Amino acid sequence: MEQRTEISSLGEFGLIEHLTKNIELQNASTVVGVGDDAAVIDHFGKQTVITTDLLIENVHFDLMYTPLKHLGYKSVVVNLSDVYAMNATPTQITLSLGISNRFSVEALDEFYEGVYAACEKYGVDLVGGDTASSQKGFIISVTAIGEVAPDKFVKRSTAKKGDLICCSGDLGAAYLGLIFLEREKKIFLETPTVKPDLEGEQYVIGRLLKPEARKDIIEFFETSSITPTAMMDISDGLSSEILHICKDSELGCVLYEEKIPIAEETRNAAFKFELDPTACALSGGEDYELLFTIPQSDHEKIVLNEQISVIGYMTEPEKGSKIITKGGNTFDITAQGWNAFNSK
Amino acid sequence: MEQRTEISSLGEFGLIEHLTKNIELQNASTVVGVGDDAAVIDHFGKQTVITTDLLIENVHFDLMYTPLKHLGYKSVVVNLSDVYAMNATPTQITLSLGISNRFSVEALDEFYEGVYAACEKYGVDLVGGDTASSQKGFIISVTAIGEVAPDKFVKRSTAKKGDLICCSGDLGAAYLGLIFLEREKKIFLETPTVKPDLEGEQYVIGRLLKPEARKDIIEFFETSSITPTAMMDISDGLSSEILHICKDSELGCVLYEEKIPIAEETRNAAFKFELDPTACALSGGEDYELLFTIPQSDHEKIVLNEQISVIGYMTEPEKGSKIITKGGNTFDITAQGWNAFNSK
């Protein structure tokens, strides 16, 4: 039988000590880490970037099919993605948890394993947080801090007319991973003896459960002397995000359906569920890819990078936000991304 | 009838826009505020301090007797208190909320009124956050950022033997405020027609519902050229906090019961409930006063400040952590502060 240590046996301070005792700080900028009223960070000569996300059980994740280690990893990654989306480098995180007593210390250890794995991979330090009891459900609040050279940060509002619209990686997979796991959950709840059939769906499931942040793209910008004119990460679906850039930059856009990068595995999964892969890419969400605009003159700098696709360009605001389909028809882009306040 | 606007009628982005549209930034260091993937902060030449707190309905607060405006105010203040406890000046906060659909937009407006009141009073900018739906209960996560001149921050671990132990303001009141409101709640639930009798208890209730952070003490340190050797804020009760300083500084201490500052109103409230005022000060919590140590040579610098009490001194670790009662008896100090994982 697995060991189960009750959280109450450690107490709040004992628990924090247990969970944070093996932290090895990686950043010289981390002056004071976990264990005081606050952490101290030294970003001399750089600007500090800060972002935060709140993840709530059964709203943002389902523990029935989300391993705790993956959840810990993902909780960190989704915040780092926001830091990269500013063209900045993440350096520290804080992590607050609301935990009900159905969790054991061993379960929390698993969660923290994922947190530390992400910290190590992305070179960030866990420097603080809070641990509270929750009456119901697991609550995760992560704040990420990063640094950026003065005025090198990239906002959403600064795209220029004629700029190329680019995105990293491929889109729509995480949404299909979710559809797939929700179906398996439903089958399991109806017939618990049926084993889940994950055959062929590893890619889309992996994209949902263990996303990565595009550190490599930010490093590529640095080495290629590219500063995007506008950038954000794709967490709510391509449609929703490009509309943010259009609205904030007071411009319109044209996207080409055929240019939107979609993995073969995603197309196959969409086919099985009788879903349109383009709709999944436009409205799915949780891709954590980067959406950015660059001047046309920078095109040759990115053309050889297979991780970057040019999917359209920015237009005058009067032209609206349009997508041209493979069949040559033009439609308005509408935001249909995941909205936490709809239907949930 | 009061207006009730459903949150779903605004959508997530509409809601954030509604709640943040009147922000006026106060700090030159706030380069980018709400509305992008992350905020950008410029603390050139200073070190950055960061702290975070998670507040969960029915664990940390009870909406039956906590006005939303006060709750918003307090959510900010408790985090600023941690920044001051590092001898730093808070400059920015982020705020994430988990909201169930029993909340209206008007209710959130009230909460934000308190948030903005605290931001204005303490000169901090709200620069980001996240809004999520919660299936049950109101969830508040605040992260506070501050700045401090290089190496002027004060940790818990650096008290020296012989240092004077000081605290600001008075202790124990918030705990009695809680006892009082819990009693009134019980009476109300049993007999809803009985009006609450708040006569004479405004002070202790105010200390619970609308605490202040000790900005003035940090400013006093600055103008008086005092750098405490160790400092923390008193959120879990004096006993728990002084034991943290002793443990982290590897020292013992002696406290004098008669020196612990307790307001007349607190003594009266304790008397009514047949509680020992000293026990309330030692084990109560939520005072948000500062506990700090200074060299004996700095005594004359603080002696005229009526907001500061000298309550004891640091000793060799072998002597343990002791309190000498008014009757002249010596007891070990034990941590009996509020522990989120006990009995709740």
Image (cartoon, coloured by chain):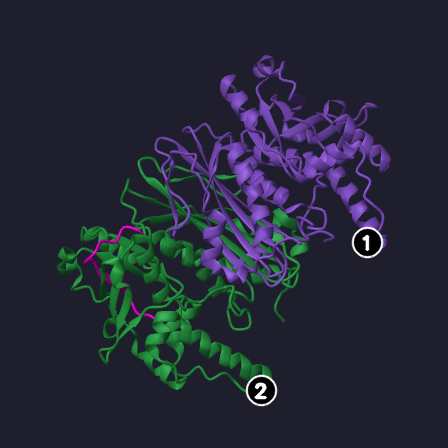
Chain colours: A green, B purple
B170, above or below A249, in the image: above
In the picture, which quadrant includes the N terminus of chain A? Answer: bottom right
Query: Which residue is painted at 66% across and 50% down in the image?
Result: A11
Whether residue A53 can be seen here = no
B238 on left or right of B198: left
Amino acid found under the numbered disc labelled 1: Leu
Q: Closer to the camera, A81 or A326?
A: A326
Residue A167 among magenta residues:
yes
The residue carrying mark 1 is B189
The residue stretch that appears in magenta: A157-171
- Residue indicated by mark 2: A193
Task: Report the side of B105 relative to B254 (left or right).
Answer: left
Above or below, comparing residue B321 to residue A292 in the picture? above
Residue A339: image x %, image y %? Answer: 47, 65
Q: Is residue A256 magenta?
A: no
Q: Are marks 1 and 2 on the same chain?
A: no
Q: Quadrant of the C terminus of chain A?
A: bottom right
Amino acid at the residue labelled 2: Thr
Residue B205's tag is none
Q: Chain of mark 2?
A: A
